[in-house]
Amino acid sequence: MYYDLHAHILPNVDDGPTEIEDALQMAKISADNGTKIILATPHRKDVAEKSSVLHIKELANSFNSLLQENGINLQLLLGMENHLDLELPEDFSNGKALPINNTKYALVEMPFFGHPNYLEEVLFQIQLQGITPILAHPERIEAVQLNPRLLVNFVDRGMLSQVTAGSVVGHFGGNVKKLTLKLLKMGLVHILASDTHFHTGPRSPILIEGLQAATSVIGQKKALAMITTTPKAVLEGNPVILPQIQIDSPKQSWWKMWNR
Ligand SMILES: [Fe+2]
């Protein structure tokens, strides 16, 4: 049974499904493909601008009732995808930013493009608040693509990383796939999640293909841990045992592999 820690499944709150029927279809596909617990992670920006934290909490409760009524064997827990900006540390303090299932872990999304000068500072500030950032899909973030050592530094400082299942199989292009495989080999990936937005497409709720692709790179035990024991520990607020980071020799210049 799998745990999916990144999902835009709550209806009509962000760029995920707009209709309840679509959300239920995503839930059914998720459950049918082995997921037992899914973490709803609506975008913090959308929640702040278009609804409220109270609304998504109520929605999570009512959605769980709907899952039961429809005989879908899936439990939904609540988190948030927190885009990184200067207000984020304060928003964790005032409850506008949500951690994962009330734990001291939080899903944090770095900007897709650019490298704002406050990036590191905000992440470290969050750590000082006692929260462990789990970096959402670093393989799709330009700053990491251009300088993967950034991720080495963040993981070295105790942060976790979550790769999108579709990235491992190439749904986001060859460059993203190549980087993802490299990050896997280096022990820089801790969690594999769907980042599902719809029941089909590159971000479907299905984790199995990503699991298989990761297995061929790092072996079944480590790959499986990314959708079982590690996300389970996070959801329960327990410590996570991190793999050793494997740094290549400078001669291999792997950080220059991004082709643009
Ligand atoms: Fe997302």
Image (tube, rainbow, N blue to C red):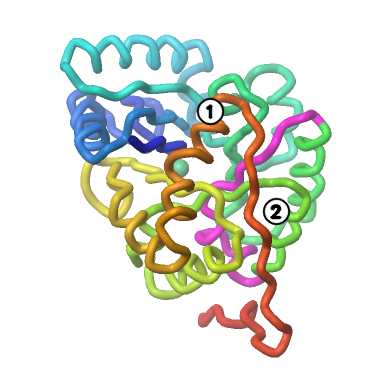
State yes or no: residue 203 in magenta: no
In the drawing, does residue 104 fall left or right of residue 12?
right
In the drawing, does residue 250 fall left or right of residue 80?
right
Q: Which residue is mark 2?
A: 155
Q: Give the quarter the ligand 1 occupies.
A: top left
**Callout 2 secondary element:** helix
State yes or no: residue 131 in magenta: yes
Residue at 38%, 30% in the rendered image: 38
In the drawing, does residue 66 fall left or right of residue 47?
left
Q: In this rendering, does residue 44 appear at all?
A: no
Residue at 63%, 72% in the rendered image: 146
Q: Nearer the viewer, residue 249 or 201?
A: 249
Disc 2 marks which amino acid? Val
Q: Which mark is residue 235?
A: 1
The image position of residue 1, as x and y in percent, is 33, 35
- Disc 2 crowd rating (10 Å Cα; few below 14, some 14-19, many 20+) is many
Disc 1 marks which amino acid? Leu
The image position of residue 254, as x and y in percent, is 62, 80
Residue at 52%, 30% in the rendered image: 80
Q: Determine the residue located farthest toward the bottom in the rendered image.
A: 251
Compute the Cα span from label 1 to label 2.
Answer: 19 Å
Residue range highlighted in magenta: 129-147
Q: Which circle's residue, 1 or 2, is located before the other in the chain?
A: 2
Quadrant in the picture for residue 228: top left
The image position of residue 65, as x and y in percent, is 28, 10
**Callout 1 secondary element:** helix
Q: Is residue 78 above or below residue 69?
A: below
The image position of residue 215, as x and y in percent, is 39, 61
